[in-house]
Image: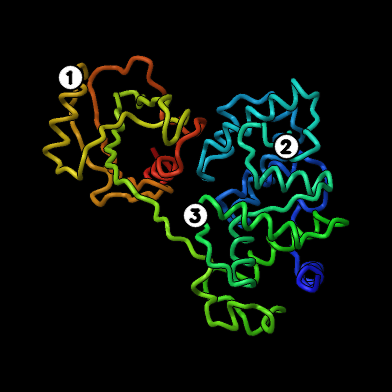
Amino acid sequence: MEFSNSLLLWYLQNKRDLPWRNTTNAYPVWLSEIMLQQTRVAQGLPYFLSFMNSFPTVLDLAKANEEHVLKLWQGLGYYSRARNMHKTAQIIAFEFDGNFPNNYNDLLKLKGIGEYTAAAIASFCFNEVVPVVDGNVYRVLSRYFNIETDIASSVARKEFSALAKELIPNNNPALFNQAIMEFGALQCVPKNPKCEICIFNESCAALQKKKVNQLPVKLKKTKVTNRYFNYLIILDSKNNTLINKRTQKGIWHNLYEFPVIETNDEVDFETILYQIHEKHSDLNIESVYTYNETQIVHKLSHQKLHIKFYKVTVSDEILNGIGLNSLKDFPFPIVIYNFIEKYSI
C-alpha cells in the first residue's frame, strides 16, 4: 500500500539513532519500552543507559534489590513500572532461564507488559506480524483516515488495531511499527504539526478537511484529586532524622519519605503546629520552622500534590534515626529528593 511504503521510506531517511533500535535482543528492547511508557525519549534515554550500565543482562536486574532499582528509577515517575519490571526480570531470569517469551500472547502474561509493549517486543525481536497501537499511532491513523472514534472508548483499540493490521507489511512488521511510532513522535505531533512539509500532505484526510487539530478525539477527562502533604524533617542535636517507607498501596509505593501530615486543604502555620504537637506528643519538640512558605505543587497523572516542608527540632535523641548524610542513599519521590538537594538536608 502506498501509505505503508511512503512511511517506511520516510523512516529510513529520518529515524533517530537510538540504542535499543540496534538490537533484536529482547532485554534492552523491553527495558526501553517500559521506560518510555508515559515518558519522552529525551527524558528516558539517560535512565536507559544508566540501567544498562548497572544491569547489563536480565539476570543482573533480577538479582538486584528493589531499593537499588527504585533509586536508579528516581525521577522517572510511575514507579509501579519499575517494581513490575523488577518482578518480571526475576521470572524471566529464574523461571525462563533468561529467555523472553518469543510471541505476543505469552509476553502478555508477564507483569507490567500490556498489549502495546507485547506487540513492540514481539515484532521488533521476533518479527511477529502484530501492530503496535500507542498514542502516536492513534494520532497518525485518526488524522490520515479521518477517524472520529473516541480513543478513550472501549472500542478504539480494536478498531485502530484492525486498521494497523491491514497496513502492516507481513515481510517487515518491525520496521513498520517503528516507522509509524517515529512518524507520530517527530512529524505528526500533537500540536502544530508541520503539515506543509509532510509526506502525506496531499493524501491526509484531516488536512484536506482542516481537522488536524481536532483529531484524535478524546472525550474522557481525567479527574484530578488535590492532596495536601505537610512533611516533617525531625532533627535531634546529632543531626539524625526520621524517614518512613511507603508500604501502603497508592503513589510512591516502597519509596521513602519524611513523616507526613496530610490535610484536607492548605492550613496555616498555627494549625499545622498544633497537629505536629498532637501527632508527635512523644517527642520533646523545641522548635518548628517552615522551609518553604509557598507550596510546592507536584502533578501526577490523577493527583495534584500541594507540599510544604517543616523543620522540627527535638531535644531527645531520635531512636532508630538516620544521619542526614545518609539520605541520598535511599529512593525518594523526586519532589522530596529535589527538596533535600535544594536545602542541603
Q: Earlier in the sequence, mark 1 or mark 2?
A: 2
Q: Earlier in the sequence, mark 3 or mark 2?
A: 2
Q: Is residue 215 above or below residue 235?
A: below
Q: Position of residue 222 (x, y in %)?
A: 39, 52
What residue is shown at x 85% (from left), y 56% (from top)?
A: 170
What residue is shown at x 71% (from left), y 63% (from top)?
A: 180
Tag nearer the camera, 1 or 3: 3
Q: Amino acid at mark 1?
A: Ser
User: Residue 281, which numbered label?
Assistant: 1
Q: Amino acid at mark 2?
A: Asn
Q: Position of residue 26 (x, y in %)?
A: 78, 40
For disc 2, the marked residue is 105
C-alpha gap between disc 1 and disc 3: 49 Å
Foreground of the two, 317 or 309? 309
> Where is the N terminus found, in terms of image quarters?
bottom right
C-alpha gap between disc 3 and disc 2: 23 Å
What residue is shown at x 54% (from left), y 45% (from top)?
A: 76
For disc 3, the marked residue is 152
Tag nearer the camera, 1 or 2: 2
User: Residue 320, which numbered label?
Assistant: none
- Report crowding for label 2: few under 14, some 14 to 19, many 20 or more residues within 10 A (C-alpha): few
Foreground of the two, 83 or 132? 132
> Where is the C terminus found, in terms of image quarters?
top left
- Report crowding for label 3: few under 14, some 14 to 19, many 20 or more residues within 10 A (C-alpha): some
Image position of 280 (left or right of 177): left
- Report crowding for label 1: few under 14, some 14 to 19, many 20 or more residues within 10 A (C-alpha): few
SS label for mark 3: loop
Q: Amino acid at mark 3?
A: Ala
SS label for mark 1: loop
Q: Is residue 56 above or below residue 185?
A: above
